[in-house]
Amino acid sequence: MAVTEAQAAGTGQHPEQGLSHPVTSTGLSNEKIAMWAFLGSECLLFGALISTYLLYRGRSVAGPFPHDVYDIPYTSVSSFVLLMSSLTMVLALAAMQRRDQRRMRVWLVTTALLGATFIGGQVYEFTVFYRAGLSLHQNLFGSSFFVLTGFHGAHVTIGILMLLSLFTISAKGRLADNRVETVELIGLYWHFVDVVWIVIFTMVYLIPGVK
Amino acid sequence: MSSTTHDEAFSSPDAAMESPEPGVEEHYPDEWQYIKVALILFAITMAEVGIYYISGAERAIISLMAVMMIAKFTLVALYFMHLRFDSKLFRRLFVTGIILAVAVYLIALSSLHVFQR
């Protein structure tokens, strides 16, 4: 994209380098670097929660135990829904790159709906588990399971709020066509919660139940 | 001090944060490639659930599940998060976080004899 000197003067862009973000020492967008650094640090947070679950696995002295409450087919469908939301998110980004905001909004709402479906499924699962006698205080499995999946669910909920905010801003015509990176940053966060679920689904749901 | 309001800054075509660097987004996959990746992810998930119900060969099944999990993680990170196409610095930041997390928690869990149970 050509950047005139007048534009560059107002935005900090470098007219000769043709950068689409302010000139930085790395030549990369600071916002994107910050998002990747944040996601790198989130690996440590979820690593701690998953490790805690693994540490307490099989150490509960009172039930319910994982095999008493897990419903693998149900959780598989939830996982599929979240995986597909990653697809709709990249399709929203692709639409934004084509400057097609109307289609981007369609994909954003689809992504938010899939995310809401996942959260709805998680709320239902928590309710079923609670009625089966599993609570945060019942045993080590309950504590570590609810904290881990609850933190993940909170991240998904924040992602949904970001998607809906972006949808509203775009619908009001306040999102310039060239702000592709805004969509990309929210997409990065969304894909991150998806990859975290990929790990949780295998480590927490599938592997402990292997006979 | 800039007189630009937040709304103006957000909607202005000259806003500081615009599209990715020129030459980067052209290398992103097209929509069909995204759909192909999603189909592969779907197939791996179905395979994961399928082998969950196989009895016996516990170690082999757990190893296979771990490989499938890593494959899914990698596909999403490389294609949906564009780590394959973007600057290597982003990859380094993310991989550093993963390596740090895996190393720290493997050491912690090993010291607590989790893998000997």
Image (cartoon, rainbow, N blue to C red):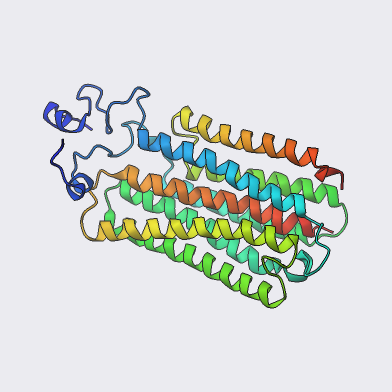
Residue A210: % across, % down: 80, 57
Q: Is residue A202 above or below residue A131?
A: above
In the image, taking residue A79 as reference, residue B53 lies left or right, namely: right
Q: Is residue A59 above or below residue B109?
A: below
Observer-nearest of A39 and A147 = A147
Farthest residue, direction bottom: A131
Q: Quadrant of residue B16?
A: top left
Observer-nearest of A114 and B45 = A114
Q: Quadrant of residue A207?
A: bottom right
Q: Quadrant of the C terminus of chain A?
A: bottom right
Observer-nearest of A180 and A121 = A121
Residue A166: % across, % down: 32, 55
Rendered residue at 74%/61% (across/down): A141
In the image, taking residue A14 as reference, residue A142 lies left or right, namely: right
Rendered residue at 59%/41% (across/down): A44
Question: Is residue B61 shown to the viewer in this render?
Answer: yes
Rendered residue at 70%/50% (across/down): A52
Q: Is residue B26 above or below residue B32?
A: above
Residue A3: % across, % down: 18, 30
